Image (cartoon, rainbow, N blue to C red):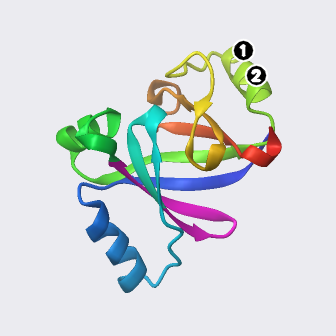
Amino acid sequence: MITGLDHIAIAVPDLEAAIERFMTDFELDYQGTEPVEAAKTTTAFFPLPPSSIELVHPLGGEGPIAKYLEKRGGGIHHLCFRTNDIDADVARLKGKGYQFLSDAPTPGAHGARVIFIHPKSCDGVLVELSQPQEDH
């Protein structure tokens, strides 16, 4: 079951400058960076309980975020909903005709299991489902 908004992800071309902006200008608490090899991204989280802002940057200059930045520049990349049963939510949404970008959840930041719903299924918005590590 979807239980809340987990985070809003922003694709950034310069991760260090964006981290500095969110820390200094907006005075947000910075949790540090984490490489997410499966997604070829480096993430930086700024918790705003009960949600977070996630900055995403290409890991090693490649992957889907690199392509996104080349095509569109920086900006809001996706919305992420927290779930306590990702497998049940995926099955339920597939039953309603939703298309996913992968066949099954993959490892995400903070040890979560994640999967993305194709933007065609959500009025042009990329939506991620994330089940935190403590829920699986």
Q: Amino acid at mark 2?
A: Arg
Find numbered disc 1 in the image and state the secondary structure of the residue it sits on: helix
The residue tagged 2 is 92
When the figure is inspected, residue 101 is found, relative to residue 29, above or below; the finding is above
Between 127 and 134, the residue placed more toward the observer is 134
Identify which amino acid the numbered label 1 is placed on. Answer: Gly
Q: Quadrant of residue 67?
A: top left
Question: Residue 46 lies in magenta, yes or no?
Answer: yes
Please report the bounds of the magenta region as a residue range.
45-57
**Circles 2 and 1: CB atoms closer than 8 Å:** yes
Q: Is residue 124 visible?
A: no
**Main SS category, magenta section:** strand
Residue 92 percent coordinates (x, y): 76, 22
Q: How many marks?
A: 2
In the image: residue 85, left or right of residue 45 = right
Q: Residue at x 32, y 54 (%)?
A: 75
Vertical order, 88 against 109 (above or below): above
Q: Quarter of the image containing the C terminus? A: top right
For image coordinates 73% across by 32% down, the residue present is 86
Q: Which mark is residue 95?
A: 1
Relative horizontal placement of residue 131, taking residue 61 as reference (left or right) = right
In terms of secondary structure, where does tag 2 sit?
A: helix
